[in-house]
Amino acid sequence: MSLDDYQGVWVFAEQNEGRLRRVSLELLGKGRELANRLSVDLAAILPGENVADLYTELIDYGADKVLWADSPKLRYYSTDIYTRVIASAATEHKPEILLVGATYVGRDLAPRIARRLNTGLSADCTDLDIDEKTRLLLQTCPAFGGDFMITIINPKHRPQMATVRPGVMQPQQKSARKGEIISIPADIENKDMRVSTLNVVKETRSGIGLEQADIIVAGGMGVRSAEDFIMLGKLAELLGAEVGATRDAVEAGWASSDRMIGQTGKTVRPRLYIACGISGATQHIVGMQDSELIVAISKDPKAPIFQIADYAIVADLHQVIPVLTQQLLRHKSGV
Amino acid sequence: MEFKLTKEQEAIRRMMREFAERKLAPIAAQIDRDAKIPPDVYPELRKLKLFGIPYDKKYGGGGESYAELVLVIEEVAKASAAVSLMLAGHYLAPISLRLYGTEEQKERCLPKLCSGEGIGTLAFTESATGSDPEAITTVAELSGDDYILNGSKRFITNAPLDGLAIIFAKTDNGVSAFIVNKNQPGYSTSKPWEMMGLRGGQVADIQLNDVRIPKANLLGSEGKGYRMLTELIAYGKVNVSACLLGIGEAALDEAIKYAKETTARGKPIANFQTIQCLIADIETQVEAARWLTYRLAYLAGQGGDIRHDSALTKLFASEMATAVTSKALQVHGSYGYTKEFKIERLYRDARFGEIIEGVSEIQRVIIAASLLR
Amino acid sequence: MNIIVCLKQVPGTNDMRLDPETGSLIREGVPSIINPEDRNALEEALLLKEEHGGNVVAVSMGPPQAEEALRDALAMGADEAILLCDKAFAGSDTLATSFTLGTAIKKLGEFDLILCGTKTLDGNTGQVGPQLAEFLDLPQITYARRVEVQGEILRAERAFEEGYELMETRLPALVTVTKEINEPRIPSIEQIMQSYREKEVRIWGTPDLGVDEHSVGLDGSATKMGKIYKPEFGKGKVEFIEGSTEDMVQGLLAKLEERHLI
């Protein structure tokens, strides 16, 4: 068995309630790029129940093949079953690369598969590349709370596995493509599933929802009072956002500690982060720097937050936020 | 000579830092704003048994040394100087008992102090004086088997908090010290003074109206009060120095943080030599204060006469705290002068150091006295 | 209940500096702490022990100074502590770490539950827990924010994107916990002193584990680390939106609309 026997890039297609998680499409986008560089096929591996309608989607987003396993027992994620199905398929078909989204499922599943296959796994990658000479997967991940980056390789074990941070890679343009559908075994008995799900509880948005929030409006010392934090709250409500706070604002008593974002608080990666009156202390930045889009509003033109922001407004938030709120209200009511 | 902490001491520091960062730092600004330590802080401190660290286990103490006590107070002070003041003030009572108490007094009074059920207080200062025994006007009259205390005390730390007070009063042959239970009839306190800093520490006046205490509550001998005070205050200064050390460290941390994060022309101001000079001075002074304080804790454990060394240490630590908080504020520029930054509070907190437990001038007199006699 | 807690000593700050010559992190002078989520795991173990009786063993793989972390664990209330320490363990990735920890745990005899923190402050992979579970062939529940045991049955609330799931499994099992689960106790000075004076930290190396040096550490790892570098803090393309307050707000809203954020 030599390393050359391993060919192909695989992506774990994670579905939830019959829909693909966006990260799976992002992985296909990156996977397509990697597969092209290696001149190999890109396959999506999709365990689930009644998810046949997803096969075309996977192919249209770049997969050459879809390896599917369909069974009622695969309807919901279960470590034991999913590990068995995917690890067996990998042992059989020998991909050289297997990518998994760093979702709650992915972070539970990927390490188990890697251990079963006795191979290496890097976590939460923000970039993937192929080394021209060695054909090895170059896995770039953050280290030490995001202050540093590190590149990892897996020279002697296969498949080379990586979990990839959602929201970082880009899906390909969807286009009608042709692909192969291959079934993989899913012979599972009840006793194989050692952990059962008794109940699934969806939580409504509350302060604890920061890590899952799409949009966050956060305030720092520039907000100056608890009352003014309420002003941020109103803006957040309009945007369907959560309210976050810096450590100093929490210590000043303007926001509760479960809203704290930063080194000693929560780490968030929303699609939009609006930083109001936040200077941009490292302590805070490490908790939100991976936000897709950062808008910073601060009256201090020297504030470090402007170094990582995408859009900067140098002005007093006490002027800007009310106008922003007003305009949004008008926008929403269609005026 | 070894200049390092033992593994146990490192572990204690780690734990206290975790406690202070988790429980005290988040409410320190609020304590300062409201000039009040929330009541639920005290049970947390009791749970960790922070009120009787260097006292014998048979009295409910921790059986450790001043070194461990200093590390605890230092970490507490770094997060909230007001809470550390409360602790330092408290310790004056068990210190007094350990030095001068009879076995009966120790058995009767130390346990509640060590557990923190009772918060200690030392009351010498009056409106006429902080250091002059001749000017004391509070009197203790012998009446049968009791003493009756009348008079008033000023600027007394922890006066309103339940527990034991060691009160100095004039008797026929000079000043004497008495153990008084603060919830005794006749003992009352004024509203706490509104202070510039260390807000949350309860510093108030005491009114003594025919406070009747048994003869058995005379501490030490009659007339020896002032001599006792100078000795026990020397031990008190170990703890005050630790408070000031914690404040100095907090100021250093704030200055470094600000210097690294604030930019001018796209680069951190830490790159400027003027800022570097300020911060270098701060660290130098803090480190000097640190090792003087640790050395003093060591000497206190040896049991000799530490009056000279504690005056020296406290003098240095207090002037250090004033100086470094000022420099750290300077690093912050205008921002340091606003309530939005922590250094503003540290600056106010530090200033009391040069006054409390003997003004700096008195410390200098004490130091010179040993050298020039 | 016999509970094993895996913990790791990590740098107490994320304010790390790189040695420009060697390219590795400067660990000297950086205070070390028990990884915060591992403390939550230990606290949960202690709570379960208080409820059900039993024994808590803390295990850690690390350099000699990791003994401090185990002493802290003993001070909190762990009954036993084992440090897996050997030069051969250096350079371990999570595969090698799970192998080493798992081999040691096999030597400890019967247990009911293994608790770990979900991830560490420094490595941040969250992989050791599940890989250890796989190595020991245990059912696993990750991201647990609540755990309950009744007899042989363990129930846990496991976080996921949209909320949480209530899971159930039979012991023995492995559970990784998040910091929501509890607030770790802070030991008293007396407990700290006792942990140094009265308790023991056993130290095991490769001979004690009965493993070959090549199956652990760098040799036993599948992944190899390349250079650590500090990324340019900043995307470098900040766009300042200017004008009157109204103009700036309009400008911002236009950008947000473009990106379908509003």
Image (cartoon, rainbow, N blue to C red):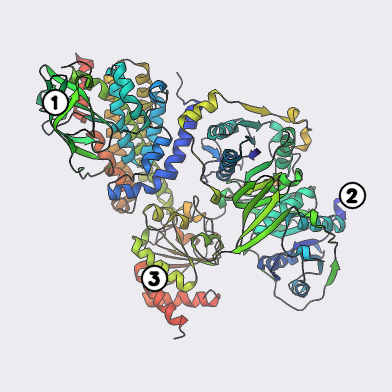
User: 10 Å neighbourhood of mark 2: few (<14), some, or many (≥20)?
Assistant: few
Q: Secondary structure at mark 1?
A: strand
Q: Which residue is mark 1?
A: B148
Q: Which residue is mark 2?
A: A1
Q: Which residue is mark 3?
A: A321
Q: Looking at the figure, which quarter contains the N terminus of chain C? A: top right
Which mark is nearer the camera, 1 or 3?
1
The lab-note entry on whether marks 1 and 3 share a chain reads: no
Q: Work out whether residue C36 or residue B372 is closer to the camera in this orientation and state it.
A: C36
Q: Is residue C177 left or right of residue A11?
A: left
Where residue A197 appears, as percent x and y from the top left, is 69, 58
Q: Work out whether residue A152 or residue C208 is closer to the camera in this orientation and state it.
A: C208
Amino acid type, residue under disc 3 in the picture: Ile
The CA distance from mark 3 to mark 2 is: 63 Å
Amino acid type, residue under disc 1 in the picture: Ile
User: 10 Å neighbourhood of mark 3: few (<14), some, or many (≥20)?
Assistant: many
Q: Quadrant of residue B147?
A: top left
